[in-house]
Amino acid sequence: MSSTPEFQHTLGKAAGFSGTSLHTGEKVTLKLHPAPVDHGIKFKRKDLQDEPTIDAKIDNLKMVERATTIGEGSVRVHTVEHVLAALFAMGVDNAIVEMDANEPPIGDGSAQPYVDLIKRAGVAAQEAPRKFFDVRESMHMEAKTGALLILLPDETFRISCTQAGPNNRFTQFLSMEVTPAIFEREIAPARTFVYYEEIQSLMDKNLIKGGSLENAIVVRGDAVLSKEPLRFADEFVRHKILDIIGDLALIGHRIRGHVVAVKPGHGANAELARAVAREQTRRDAISVPRTLPPGEGGFDTDEVMQILPHRYPFLMVDRIVGFEGETKCIGMKTVSINEPFFQGHFPGHPVMPGVMQVEAMAQVASILLFKLAKTSSRVGYFMSADEVKFRKPVFPGDTIFIHAELTKARGNRLAKAKCHCVVNDAVVSEGELMFTFLDK
Ligand SMILES: [Zn+2]
């Protein structure tokens, strides 16, 4: 549906429908409205005074029993996952979900009514880039329920899911890329299902007052009870994928990664969403240019260049962030796509060469030694590099923090430094360097 996947999208116009809510069994009308760039998805309670809104963000998650509930202050909306899955998968980044109750209509227990609604409203591109979360290293989440979720790097958003019922009945597996067309055809029609043995406790907790065989499939033993026959032989795993999409939509970013899910549930899905959101916050904090302490604390580029003889393209330190005592120092370098080494390392797949990181360590260590010796009349020469390890790739856009610690200084001719490079709070490379000094 969306032909410009790099840009944010909203709805072409407002559209709504009415139905029954699952929790209370009461009638509810839901209306989707277009929203401006960077607005995200917000729920609006039209039935309450001042019509409060709730951001569909993981920070607002309140409850994950059976369905996903979000809230701000005392205001709640329940069972948000199906409408969120439809908006996310159909490519809508910005919208207001207006309701006159605390829950969207359950419809037929699938996301089909919401896909129909979004298609009636239309999807329109906006003039701002989408926010993506690129999975750079694997993350995983394990819950007491037996749920296991793993997030792996991938260029597209994919989900591979294994669903298993009590005693491994109805074990089903499905793997797919999530695109609007695939979601509409393969996932949106899959309905909610419930195990017969769970129904009594859900009824006791007043969680399914509006539940019926018209909006859920009931599984009793090996039998499947529903008003309409199964829509897919593996309808259950498809609905599990639908719920994963809806819960991960709370991250607020599009995901480029592969979700591998075993026996997922709302609790584990939400935990993964939380972990991703935390990682995103950390990345945001690091990518924003920091104001570095002037003078005392560190050295700016000019001062670095007064000490080091290196020049473009071989100066591997932008600034010295600060010193810790006489023996420790942290430098930084922002790695840009314009670095000359990216042209050949590698075309179409830019990764910073590890030896350039070792060079950056050596330069920061040299500055440390200079400060100690208080002279720049000598220049340090590399004698050896031991225990060098490259742990993670460094990409264009990364900011490297280069840590150097002087471990040995023999006279003023020989010195040893322990160094490591950090990107996004993770060590990407390390090594022990030895220098000798010669007069310039
Ligand atoms: Zn569901």
Image (spheres, grey):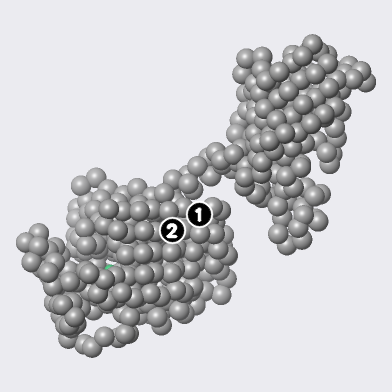
- Quarter of the rendering occupied by the C terminus: top right
Residue at 23% in and 79% down: 108
Secondary element under disc 2, as helix, strand or loop, is strand
Q: Which residue is labeled 2 in the image?
A: 150
Label of residue 182 in the image: none
- With respect to residue 136, does 288 lie above or below? above
Is residue 268 visible in this depiction of the protein? yes
Q: Which residue is labeled 1 in the image?
A: 138
Q: Is the distance from the Cβ of mark 1 to the nearest ligand 1 atom less than 8 Å?
A: no
Q: State if disc 1 and disc 2 touch (CB < 8 Å).
A: yes
Estimate how packed mark 2 is, as few (under 14), some (14 to 19) or many (20 or more) residues with alpha carbons within 10 Å.
some
Task: Say whether disc 2 or disc 1 marks the residue closer to the N-terminus.
Answer: 1
Is residue 51 visible in this depiction of the protein? no
Q: In x, y percent, where is residue 414?
A: 80, 18
Q: In x, y percent, where is residue 70?
A: 27, 54
* Horizontal side of residue 229 vs 333, given as left or right: left
Estimate how packed mark 1 is, as few (under 14), some (14 to 19) or many (20 or more) residues with alpha carbons within 10 Å.
few
| CA distance for labels 2 and 1 | 7 Å
Kind of residue at badge 2: Ile
Q: In x, y percent, where is residue 300?
A: 72, 26
